[in-house]
Amino acid sequence: MFKVNEYFDGKVKSISFTETEGAATVGVLAQGEYEFNTGKAEIMSIVSGKVAVSLPGESGWREVNAGEKFHVPANSKFGIKALVESAYLCQFR
């Protein structure tokens, strides 16, 4: 069954589900800056909007537009800035 998650005083919301390949979430980000911890590797696809990400092993922030994705290594932290309200698909691998 689906699980609804809410973070950062409701500014980030997601719904968890299971794909054939494993766990995933689809969600939305209000404009703002957030930091997440992850135990599993993630593939983040930006479905709508525009974000900037700060990933382990990279210096600074880089922009990611709708239709693009980025990879987050397992057992790490990453920063994400929603430059506008944005939607994402996160696949845990």
Image (tube, rainbow, N blue to C red):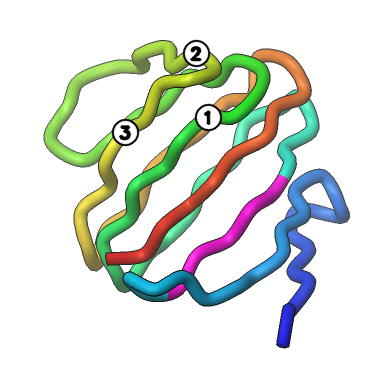
Which residue is drawn at the image coordinates 71% and 58% (left, top)?
14
Mark 1 and mark 2 residues within 8 Å of each other at the beta carbon: yes
Q: Which residue is mark 1?
A: 46
Q: What's the distance in space between the residues labelled 1 and 2, CA to CA? A: 6 Å
User: Is 65 situated above or below 18?
Assistant: above
Which residue is drawn at the image coordinates 27% and 66% (left, top)?
93
User: Is 29 situated above or below 39?
Assistant: above
Residue type highlighted by circle 3: Phe
Residue type highlighted by circle 1: Ile
Residue bounds of the magenta highlight: 23-27
Name the N-terminal-most of marks 3 and 2. Answer: 2
Secondary element type, mark 2: strand
Residue type highlighted by circle 2: Asn
Residue 70's disc is: 3
Image spot of residue 28 (x, y percent): 73, 41
User: Is 34 situated above or below 54?
Assistant: below
